[in-house]
Image (cartoon, helix red, strand yellow):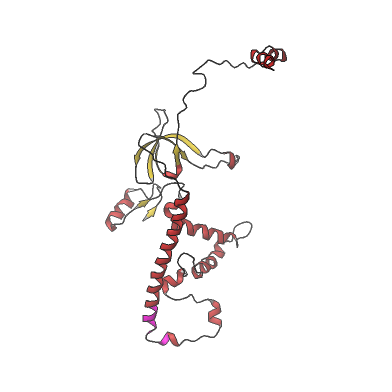
């Protein structure tokens, strides 16, 4: 079972149920849809299809949903080479047009039809597995060609990518990275547990599990402003006479 890290899925009830059913429970990380890629990719396709048929007020999406899912289940996919309906039932879907047009029903009464259906279904599933592996290998080659792995160790300070939308503020100007966070544990090859660096004793330090693609190194500034020399900023406006008597300006004028 794959789920997010919601409290419902982390409850003792779900944990006990998984133990009784001997179910392996995998948890996804936030802001990283690739963890549950099959579901997220289908959701994106479904939303794109619904957006083409819903009205301006978006109130009729539930009415067009059966037609959209029918079109999806009967369409041939590039990754598998077959439609989802064919992989499950071993035959092409029967459309309303097929019912209207004349067709031969002899195969429905053939004793060998069931055996042919089972054989055809198994062959389609095996071919679909081969096509999926080829598609995954192609995606892996494209990803590895552009990906550069960055090592992280326990105790490193990092920024965490957290896209947050706020009403009334431009999304383009919002902060994308927050922190610094400290890496406390490596959960797997691509996930880390991070801890907030807040110094407020009244609040418990927040911990989260993030994917490696959401973090980047945080580099502590070597010198803060005012450590090397004390700078006094005046709130009074600078007059023209003050700018003329500036030593830096006079030295620059002599050099010219």
**Which residue is located at x 28 percent, y 54 percent?**
19
The residue most toward the right is 240
Is residue 90 positioned above or below 42 on the image?
below
Number of numbered discs on residues? 0
Q: Is residue 118 left or right of residue 146?
A: left
Q: Is residue 174 left or right of residue 85?
A: right
Q: Position of residue 141 (x, y in %)?
A: 45, 55
Is residue 37 positioned above or below 203 on the image?
below
Would residue 112 be counted in the magenta stretch?
yes
- Answer with the quarter of the image where residue 218 lies: top left
**Which residue is located at x 54 percent, y 62 percent?**
62
Q: Position of residue 146 (x, y in %)?
A: 48, 49
Q: Position of residue 212 (x, y in %)?
A: 42, 44
Q: Quadrant of the C terminus?
A: top right
Is residue 225 positioned above or below 97 on the image?
above
Which region of the structure is painted magenta? 108-117
Q: Quadrant of the N terminus?
A: bottom left
């Amino acid at each position: 079972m794959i789920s997010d890290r919601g409290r419902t899925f982390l409850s003792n009830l779900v944990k006990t149920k998984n133990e009784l059913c001997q179910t392996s429970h995998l948890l996804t990380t936030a802001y990283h849809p690739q963890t549950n890629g099959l579901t997220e990719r289908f959701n994106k396709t479904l939303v794109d299809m619904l957006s083409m048929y819903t009205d301006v007020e978006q109130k009729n999406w539930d009415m067009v949903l059966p037609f959209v899912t029918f079109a999806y289940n009967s369409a041939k996919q590039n990754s598998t080479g077959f439609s989802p309906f064919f992989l499950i039932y071993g035959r092409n879907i029967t459309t309303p047009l097929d019912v209207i047009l004349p067709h031969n029903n002899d195969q429905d009464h053939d004793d060998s039809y069931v055996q042919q259906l089972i054989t055809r279904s198994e062959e389609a599933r095996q071919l679909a597995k081969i096509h999926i592996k080829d598609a995954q290998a192609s995606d892996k080659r494209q990803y590895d060609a552009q990906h550069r792995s960055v090592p992280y160790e326990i105790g490193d300070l990092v920024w965490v990518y957290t896209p947050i939308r706020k009403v009334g503020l431009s999304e383009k100007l919002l902060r994308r990275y927050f922190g610094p966070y400290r890496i406390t544990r490596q959960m797997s090859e691509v996930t880390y547990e991070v801890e907030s660096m807040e110094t407020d004793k009244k609040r418990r330090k927040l911990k989260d599990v993030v994917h490696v693609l959401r973090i980047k190194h945080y580099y502590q500034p070597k010198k803060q402003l005012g450590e090397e020399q004390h700078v006094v900023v005046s709130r009074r406006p600078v007059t023209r006479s003050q700018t003329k008597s500036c030593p830096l300006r006079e030295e620059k004028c002599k050099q010219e």
